[in-house]
Amino acid sequence: MSVVAPLFTLTFIIITMSVSKWQKLGLEKEIGIGTIRSALQPLAIGYVLQFVFNAKHPLFMAGIIAVMIVVASWNAGQRGGGSGASIFGSASPSRRPRPW
C-alpha cells in the first residue's frame, strides 16, 4: 500500500468531520474514535494471529480453538435477540418442537 491511500482516507475523514461540524451534528468525537479504532484493531488482531499461527503445541492450539468457539457462540446468541444465548440452549428438550 502506498502513501496515497491513507492520505485519501484522511482527506475523506476530515471532510466528514467538517460537514458534521458545519451541520452541528456533534459527530466529530465519534468519527475520530472510529478512525483510530479502524487503524488499531486490525494491527492488534494481526499480532494476535501471528502469535496464534506460530504456536506449535497442540494443546495450546486446541485451547485457542475452544475459546474461539465459545466466544463466537456467545456473540451469535447475543445478536439473535438473546434467545438461545446459552451454548447448549438449542439442545434442551423444552425448545424442541412437539410432534403433534
Image (tube, helix red, strand yellow):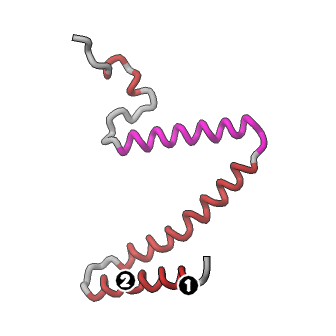
| Above or below, 93 relative to 42 | above
Relative height, residue 50 to residue 96 (above, below): below
User: Quick check: 39 above or below 9?
Assistant: above
**On-image quarter of the N terminus:** bottom right
How far apart marks 1 and 2 lie (CA) works out to: 20 Å
Farthest residue to the top: give it: 100
Query: In front of the other: label 1 or label 2?
Result: 1
Q: Which residue is the extreme one toward the left?
A: 100
Question: Closer to the camera, 32 or 45?
Answer: 45
Reading the chain from its start, which is encountered first: label 1 or label 2?
1
Helix or strand or loop: what does disc 1 sit on? helix
Question: Quick check: is 64 in the magenta stretch?
Answer: yes
- Label 1: few (<14), some (14–19) or many (≥20) C-alpha neighbours in 10 Å: few
Towards the viewer: 34 or 16: 16
Residue at horizontal 41 percent and vertical 42 percent from the top? 76
Q: Is label 2 in a helix, a strand or a loop? A: helix
Q: Please report the bounds of the magenta region as a residue range.
A: 56-79
Tag shown at residue 35: none
Residue 77 image position (x, y, % from top left): 39, 39
Q: Is residue 33 left or right of residue 3?
A: left
Tell me, for residue 4, which label it has, or none: 1
Quadrant in which the C terminus appears: top left
In the picture as drawn, the residue positioned furthest to the right comes out as 56
Vertical comparison of 31 with 22: above or below: above
Instruction: Give the image location of residue 69, x and y in percent.
Output: 54, 38
Residue at 24%, 85% in the rendered image: 23
Q: Amino acid at mark 2?
A: Met
| Residue lying at 56% horizontally and 42% vertically, measured from the top left | 68
Q: Give, as a three-letter code, the residue at label 1.
A: Val
In the depicted view, which residue is nearer to us: 4 or 90? Answer: 4
Q: Which residue is mark 2?
A: 17
Estimate the x, y position of residue 20 in percent, counting from the top left: 30, 82
